[in-house]
Image: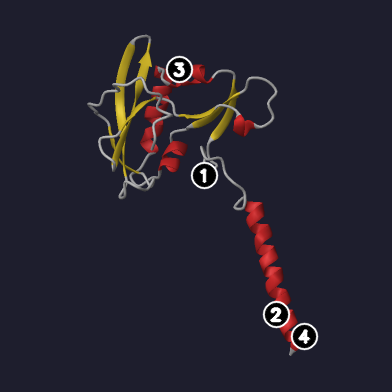
Amino acid sequence: MTILRMAIGGTTVCEIVASLFLLAGSGCLFMRDPLDPLGALDHRAVRELSQVEQEARGSAAYERARHRAESVTPGMSVAEFEAAMGAVVVVERRGNEDDEMHLPRRKVIGGLLCRVAPSGRRQRWVFGYDEGGVELIGFAVEFQRDDPEEEDWVVRRIDWSPSDECLTAEDPSTVAR
């Protein structure tokens, strides 16, 4: 009976160890980039964040965003939405720094001009371009959440004819979600 218990106990330990190796191999035990929770975004090193942000507010970036928005569906999480829209995590390299997590970083979505929060449960991300003194508001993506204390935002709908305005010069990547 003792040998049987040891065999069963040994198998259980082996199964646990094997499961841990599988989890480690799949990346479940390691921290993901907080700017890329799904691990689905491109990451790019740049010289200046401001130049990338300026390009993301241009008409070419807006046109790409408008086409990508066709694949957005209601119920998508923010992370799924950002992946569908081709968001990029950019890191500003100033020299030979090895630790990328301590460098200035931002998530950039082409065509995103601003975020407007009409209430604690609703939020609109306004897309268009602001180039050479000409601003166009093209569409807005509306997000909602059930609990204003949680961060579980989901896409509610896309408004293809918005009347929103981006009244602040606030950087869209710094607005809290």
The residue pinned by badge 4 equals 3
Element type at mark 2: helix
The residue pinned by badge 1 equals 38
Earlier in the chain: of badge 2 and badge 3, it is: 2
Residue closest to the far left: 163
The residue pinned by badge 2 equals 8
- Amino acid found under the numbered disc labelled 1: Leu
Q: Is residue 96 above or below residue 69?
A: above
Earlier in the chain: of badge 2 and badge 4, it is: 4
Residue 117 falls in image quadrant: top left
Marks 3 and 1, Cα distance to the nearest angstrom?
Answer: 26 Å
- Residues at discs 4 and 3 in contact (Cβ within 8 Å): no
Q: Residue 165 location, x and y as percent? A: 26, 23
Marks 2 and 3, Cα distance to the nearest angstrom?
Answer: 62 Å
Marks 1 and 2, Cα distance to the nearest angstrom?
Answer: 37 Å
Earlier in the chain: of badge 4 and badge 3, it is: 4
Element type at mark 1: loop
